[in-house]
Image: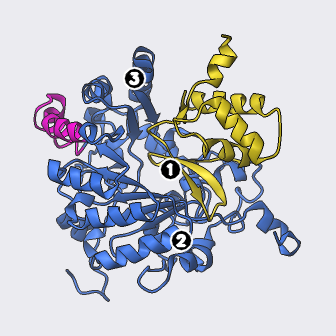
Amino acid sequence: MTTDTQTPAAIDSPIGPPLWLLAEVTYACPLHCVFCFNPVDYAHSGPELSTADWIRVLGEARAAGSVQCGFSGGEPLVRDDLEILVAEAHRLGFYTNLLTSGIGFTPERAKALKDAGLDHVQLSFQDSTRELNDFLSHTKTFALKRKAADLIQANGWPMVLNCVVHRLNIDYIDKIIELAVELGAEYLELANSQYYSWAQINRDGLMPSREQLERAERITQEYREKLGDKLRIFFVVPDYYETRPKKCMNGWGNIFLTITPDGSALPCHTAKMIKHLDFPSVKTMDIKSIWYDSHAFNHYRGDAWMKEPCKTCPEKAKDLGGCRCQALMLTGDAANADPVCDKSEHHQVVIDAVALAQIPDAQRVQTKPLVFRDPINSRKLSPAPADTTPA
Amino acid sequence: MSDESARLQTTPRVAPMFRLQWEEVQQSWVLLYPEGMVKLNGSAGEIMQRIDGKKTVAQLIEELETAFDATGLQADVLAFLDIAIAQGWVKP
């Protein structure tokens, strides 16, 4: 230990390793979810990293101390080299997680992934707004999930289901929980959509009312009591209903590292919206330098960047001022307090959004149709930057 | 046979949901599970790394006492096992 050379600040907040590596291997996806967290301008993303690039990135991240590796997307099964990447991650000692909708999860691929050393599959319910009826009537969607769930069980993986809940499906929370029980899930995450990217565009249509939330929480609690250890249920409320912000990503550049399909390194999967930061690419910088030395990863690390009211706030270590992306989206400055906090001078925008959520759709003066995540909408909403050739 | 002496003859194992491994960068033993990690402190790591589903609790204690040239570790080991079982890391 060289404590004699450390400044007090360094002792308070030593930079730990990037324990969590999220490998977003592709933005390609057969679904068009209105709450997708992929960037709205994803259609302008550069070419995907090659197999060799990913293998190098996995090695560098592991050497820097990453232990959890999530293969995500888009739909990661779209990449036909996924088995190769999982095998390499496993060989390096990662705990490997696949985050999938189950589309493309065939018995052959499930076996190949098991052989490659895949540790865990998180199965998510797909676009349940467009397919709400189908979803509730247990037809096509159920058949797909049943198949995926059977493969998860047959291969001995723990069964973790994830369902994004929102204004349009939250009233059917009992049916969702029963579906999870029927599929043999051990864990169920009922996560309200968070309002970023596509979900931010669709926020007014997705945010549940307080009454809907309270009912859903009550029903969830009843099921917890009834089911006991058989199914563990996590319920996440939208942070707009709180008065203190979440400690987003457990801190900027603290444990979490996302690599996007084209090789950008980000402290969270939506951070690229912060345009004044030049996020490094794994094509030109190694993971250790990115994590410890890059301007982008150091910029909002710790609390030196804070302005008031965060700077002198007695709770600043608890939430680190909340989410930088949310501060940017709702106040125009990523260095402001997350306006979920009622100490923020911009908190009114959150109050207004929550107030709108209490108004039934039929009584709203204006309702915006939901915007589905697809390449056409992506190009429409985000014209190509002048310096890139449109794909 | 008392409860405690019966317990000493059990052969605990790491629960299937968890994977124990040494992390060089963190200089510690960790338990990995779906999307999560438990970082073990020094003594927890020393106990966990010896749990293999074959050794009895009595053998674990003996091995630890030999390794650390110590005596009277039984209470500490049993207390840790209580926590590890309650947390679901270890099956008795």
Are labels 2 and 3 assigned to the same chain?
yes
Secondary element at image label 3: helix
Instruction: Report the residue marked by disc 1.
Output: A349
The residue at which mark 3 appears reads as A230
User: In the rendered image, which quarter is residue A158 located in?
Assistant: top left
Label 2 sits on residue: A63
Q: Is A268 on the left-hand or right-hand side of B63? A: left
* Chain letter for the residue marked with disc 2 in the picture: A
What is the quadrant of the C terminus of chain B in the image? top right
In the rendered view, tell whether residue A173 sits above or below residue B18.
above
Q: Are marks 2 and 3 in contact (CB under 8 Å)?
A: no
* Residue A372 magenta-highlighted: no
Among numbered discs 1 and 2, the one appearing first in the sequence: 2
Say which of B79 and A305 sits in front: B79
Q: Residues within 10 Å of mark 3 (few under 14, many from 20)?
A: few
Q: Who's the residue at 10% across and 37% down the image?
A: A140
Give residue A310's position: percent from left, percent from top. Answer: 70, 56
In the image, which is nearer the foreground, mark 2 or mark 3?
2
User: Any idea which chain is the yellow one in this picture?
Assistant: B
Are both tags, 1 and 3, on one chain? yes
Q: Position of residue A112 (x, y in %)?
A: 23, 56
Closer to viewer: mark 1 or mark 2? 2
Q: Marks 2 and 1: in contact by CB < 8 Å?
A: no
Task: Specify the segment rendered in magenta.
Answer: A126-151
Amino acid at pointer 1: Val
Separation of disc 1 and disc 3 at Cα?
A: 41 Å
Q: Amino acid at mark 2?
A: Ala
